[in-house]
Amino acid sequence: MPDLKNAFEAAVAQSKTLTERPDNATLLKLYALYKQGTEGDVSGSKPGFSDMVGRAKWEAWSRCKGQSVGEARQAYIDLVGSLS
């Protein structure tokens, strides 16, 4: 697991240096996998309609519900790798 944690941290750092900004759907997927990989299942209440960004992030994270931290971290690593 320490190797996965180190690879995840490296992918997080790499995601901040991408040469091209990913599309919004990919950014939401990155956000959701990061949150699932660091905090686990979604928490808190779903933001209201007036908070469109917060709501989109919450919904993306919610779609990862039930995925283990390790699975989410590996998916994040794979996604960042495909963007590089």
Image: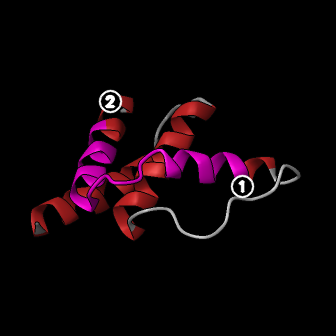
Q: How does the figure colour the protein chain or chains? A: secondary structure
* Label 1 sits on residue: 54
The answer to whether residue 73 is magenta is yes
Q: Name the spot of residue 23 as percent of width and height, x first.
A: 59, 29
Q: Nearer the viewer, residue 74 or 16?
A: 74
Quadrant assignment for the N terminus = bottom left
The part of the image, by quadrant, that contains residue 60 is: top right
Rendered view: 28 above or below 23: below
Identify which residue is drawn at 33% across, 46% down. 76
- Label disc, if present, on residue 82 of the rendered structure: 2
Task: From the image, state whether disc 2 or disc 1 is nearer to you.
Answer: 1
User: Where residue 16 sits in the image (x, y, percent)?
Assistant: 48, 51
Residue 56 in which image quadrant:
top right
- C-beta proximity under 8 Å, tags 2 and 1: no
Single out the residue that lies furthest toward the right.
50
How dense is the environment of label 2, judged by Cα within 10 Å: few (below 14), some, or many (20 and up)?
A: few
Q: Secondary structure at mark 2?
A: helix
Report the residue at 48% width, 50% height from top: 32
Check the image and report above or below for 48 versus 15: below
Task: Rate crowding at label 1 as few (under 14), some (14 to 19) or many (20 or more) other CA atoms within 10 Å.
Answer: some
Q: Quadrant of residue 83?
A: top left
2 or 1: tag closer to the N-terminus: 1
Residue 60 in the figure: left or right of residue 41: right
Q: Is residue 16 visible to the viewer in this orientation of the structure?
A: no
Find residue 62 and report its horizontal and vertical position in percent: 51, 51
- The residue sitting at 75% across, 59% down in the picture is 47
Q: Amino acid at mark 1?
A: Gly
Q: Main secondary structure of the magenta part?
A: helix
User: In front: 71, or 78?
Assistant: 71
